[in-house]
Image (tube, helix red, strand yellow):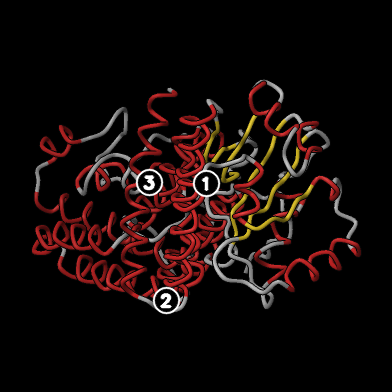
Amino acid sequence: MTVLTNDDISYITRILLLLNDNIKDSSVSRQGLSKRMDMNRNYLEDLQKRTGKYDQYIKFFDLAINILLIDKDNFKFKSKTHYERFREGSLELIFQEMVRKGVYSDELVINLQKAQFKAINYTLYALTKAMYNKFSEDELNQLKEGRSNKFLYSMTRLSNDIGGVETLSQTLRYEMFITPEKIALIKSIINQYEAFAFDECRYAKELMEEIPRLRTSKRSAYIGRTSHPILENFFRKVWILKMKIRSNHEFEFNKPRSNHRIDTFLDVRNQKQLKDLLKISSDKSLKNYKTLFIDYIIPSLKALKKCVFSKLSPDKHYLAKDRALIIVFYSSYSDKIFEEIEKLLNKSSIPYKNNVRFIDIMDFADLFNLDELNIQRLKDINRIIKDAMLGNDKSLETLEAMSNSALYELSRADKRKS
């Protein structure tokens, strides 16, 4: 079996090596595999080079569908087990590349996101196969998207069919789970095509039905992801409406090297009103930085290094000489957090660690001199989050509704900027 030891080997090459390890004739090239997928002979070669924002999400799911569509008889697999090993192993390599690119980055929910990733891919595969069985080649050609060589029931198509082009991309952007309402819509689409690919559709539905269970299996992580858009949108609206301060949310600051994002980005240098506000704040030193990176976290003493200190990793590129990183704590947590953080920071050799601030969400609000009405609104949001964390399902449902509303407003704000 081929041993992969070089970290620089691309994920496309790893998929090819995995294929050659599991078939009898181990001499398939990139171009050969591309052609067996009924794609342009340079499909895999070009895929490796594409780094655009749109491609970063969509290309991975399209590749996964193309791999799952490979029939066992397309190659001389050593056995059915080797065939399944190639399919599952390829999806794992694609997922790990998405992690490397920062599409998935929250270590607390990586395994849960992997389960959703698998469910989405097998759903897209099942619907693609069903439509191949239902429609003629001419009909499928009319359904093709863009310049694609062949029809795929893509991530974009599914997103459009359940509510809009951004419906599923938002789950990726915020590393959230698909809501029960959207899962019901997806299952209804699968049901429409089940007769044309029964086994594949049935398996896709089984995987989809697992997602609502993920919602509460890691409740704290789920609530963290669900509450992020609410906080980002709350501060965005306060800043722009009350103070004329512009901000960016889920800011992809490290393009094209990766898709790593920061929750909120503030440009200090080019916004006089922000700089003037920071001059009279409780932390006047913040006015000296070019930019502020803000990350919202529900901290845990038990998982302090994982949920907090992972943000300081050089791999994330959050820290820089002219940038302050403000990590905002919210919901319920122990006051010992700050003491433990200080101990860990003192022991660490993290570059620019003096540029990091750890602060409670209400103290963070005080930095910007929020009025009483917005202070109360923020307290109410935090209370709902705390109640949801304590197991109150009604509060969790309220939080989900608030999150959906916030996502809609954030998406409208993005469109106005563009």
Is residue 118 or residue 166 the one in the foreground? 166
Q: Earlier in the sequence, mark 3 or mark 1?
A: 1
Q: Residue at x 77, y 43 (%)?
A: 283
Above or below 399: residue 35: above
Q: Are marks 2 and 3 in contact (CB under 8 Å)?
A: no
Local crowd at mark 1 within 10 Å, few (<14), some, or many (≥20)? some
Q: Nearer the viewer, mark 2 or mark 3?
A: 3
Above or below 333: residue 113: above
Q: Does the rendering let one see residue 90? A: no
Q: Please state if 28 lies on the left or on the right of 154 as rendered.
A: right
Q: Position of residue 249 (x, y in %)?
A: 52, 39
> In the rendering, which numbered label is found on residue 29?
1
**Amino acid type, label 3:** Ala
Q: Residue at x 47, y 46 (%)?
A: 374
Real-space Cα separation, disc 2 to disc 3, in angstroms: 45 Å
Q: Residue at x 81, y 38 (%)?
A: 285
> In the rendering, which numbered label is found on residue 406?
3
Q: Please state if 200 lies on the left or on the right of 72 as rendered.
A: left
**Amino acid type, label 1:** Ser
Q: Quadrant of the C terminus?
A: top left
Above or below 20: residue 54: above
Real-space Cα separation, disc 1 to disc 2, in angstroms: 22 Å
Q: Nearer the viewer, mark 3 or mark 1?
A: 3
